[in-house]
Image (cartoon, coloured by chain):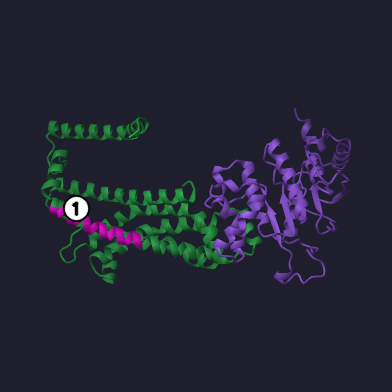
Chain colours: A purple, B green
Amino acid sequence: MLEDIDLVIEAGSFVALLGPSGCGKSTLLRFISGLDRPASGSIALSPGADEARPSTRPKLSFVFQDAQLLPWRSVLDNVALPLELQGSSRAQARERARGPLAEVELSDVHERFPDQLSGGMRMRVSIARALVTEPSVLLLDEPFAALDELTRQRLDERLRKLWQARRMTVIFVTHALAEAAFLAERALVMSRRPGRIVLDHPLQLPENRVFELRTNAEFVAQTALLYRALQEHGALEDAPHAPEQARG
Amino acid sequence: MRPSATRELLHSALPPALTFVLVIALWEGAVRALAVPKFLVPPPSDVLLATWTERAALSGALLTTAQGAGLGFLLSASLGTSLGLIFSLSRWLERGLYPYALFLQTVPIVAVAPLLVLWFGPGLRAVSVSAFIVSVFPIIANTLAGLRSVDPRLADLFRLYDAKLLDTLLKLRLPTAIPSMMTGLKVASGLSVIGAIVGEFVAGFSEGNAGLGITVLAAYRQLRTDLLFAAVLLASALGLLLFALVSSLSTLLLRRLRAHG
């Protein structure tokens, strides 16, 4: 599924991983997280350290496409879950969950349940849950794909601010070009399956990013560059020359 | 009561109530008009009368059967849930034991009831084992299915944080499984009454405590069809009561878990 991926990601960088559906970008993310293992090749999260010892492994969090909250737990208890799983007492975990919830501005809904929240709020809870362990690596797999445009823009801005404040390594999988350009310091474009990295592009855009950036000429040029890379590698699924389109 | 609630109750309760009244009236009228012998089909008024005159014996029988069914149900709820849990932990154990659990479902209970008397002794013990055998399988199967239905991405989340087996069980698998487990318990609650009655047919008498199954047999031998009807109706009511109990428990639990069963 993946081919010839040779990639070094610097600690503290924000990388967007772009590609068409099914190119293997989610698979690559799962390999990095350790949830799956590649058939060949290796991944080192902190090269040089003894990866077999859990204490030296960098802390890692994963944000899934849907918020993936436990419906029977309140917002606060959902955010506290990772700490509980790692051995904290419930009271201690709940106390420490308050910080990340404040960071995503959900302090007033602690005792609500996921079915009482909007999609955007659920995703913010999911991000708070990922931050609660103070991870040094944050992996996000198309987290905002199902949200409306306005909510998505707000969450993009928030995620960018969180990264600026914490400087953890972020790997963000998306198929939205503008979102990748808006968020990341570096964009990786993957080809159609078998996935290869066809473009490794540093995004030279201002540090503080707000909505107005999206109309900036430099931003538009960078997005266009990513678009051409995607198009060139036959990645766009509705390309006019695709044979399926010929049928009436 | 709010007017909308009254209307809702009327909407849900009125049709079955009307059906009931209509059927009873037709039954009473037909039996009287056609002069059907009472030992074949007694009119509802006779059944009601028999229920009243035999109330002491019937309520004793109801209590006895309720004990057998209740004990059998508790047995299958605890053992069935545990077995489902054990099967979910090991594919090996599941493959080794599941076919024999299925055997409990397919064994003709009437045929093995005499064995139960030999092994467990007559009366309550054989009766509750019979109720257990009839009701345990749906609990095992539904517990197992529920524990296996965990969302793979939530399982990933737990794996990512190196969750211990016990944490994964208590904080993910069991809460996920509860709606399905409740379905199994509801099915089992009705079955346990059937199992108890069948058990009583063979093993019922012990220290003068006769259950509804014995009452049915005795009424049949004396051609007291009115009493037979009364006992059968009481047995059905007992099944419904047990079902309603488990159902309301399930509704409460599911509401706490914010799940939809």
Q: Is residue B87 magenta?
A: no
Closer to the camera in the image, A163 or B5 = A163
Q: Is residue B59 magenta?
A: yes
SS at circle 1: helix
Tell me the quarter of the picture where residue B152 sits: bottom right
Q: Specify whether residue A189 is in view.
A: yes
Q: Which residues are magenta?
A: B56-74
Left or right: A84 as drawn, with respect to B108: right
Q: Quadrant of the N terminus of chain B?
A: top left
Identify residue type, mark 1: Val
Q: Is residue B101 above or below residue B233?
A: below
Q: Residue at x 14, y 50 (%)?
A: B55
Tell me the quarter of the picture where residue A153 sits: top right
According to the picture, the residue beneath numbered tag 1 turns out to be B216
Q: Residue at x 62, y 47 (%)?
A: A106
Our reading of the magenta stretch's main secondary structure is: helix
Q: Is residue A212 above or below residue B129?
A: above
Q: Specify whether residue B43 is in view.
A: no
The percent coordinates of residue B203 (x first, y second) are: 23, 63
Q: Residue furthest top?
A: A248
Q: Callout 1 environment at 10 Å: few (<14), some (14 to 19), or many (20+)?
A: many
Closer to the camera in the image, A191 or B222 = A191
The percent coordinates of residue B165 (x first, y second) are: 57, 66
Left or right: B24 as drawn, with respect to B253: left
The percent coordinates of residue B141 (x first, y second) are: 46, 57
Closer to the camera in the image, A125 or A63 = A125
The percent coordinates of residue A214 (x first, y second) are: 81, 36
Left or right: B130 as drawn, with respect to B58: right
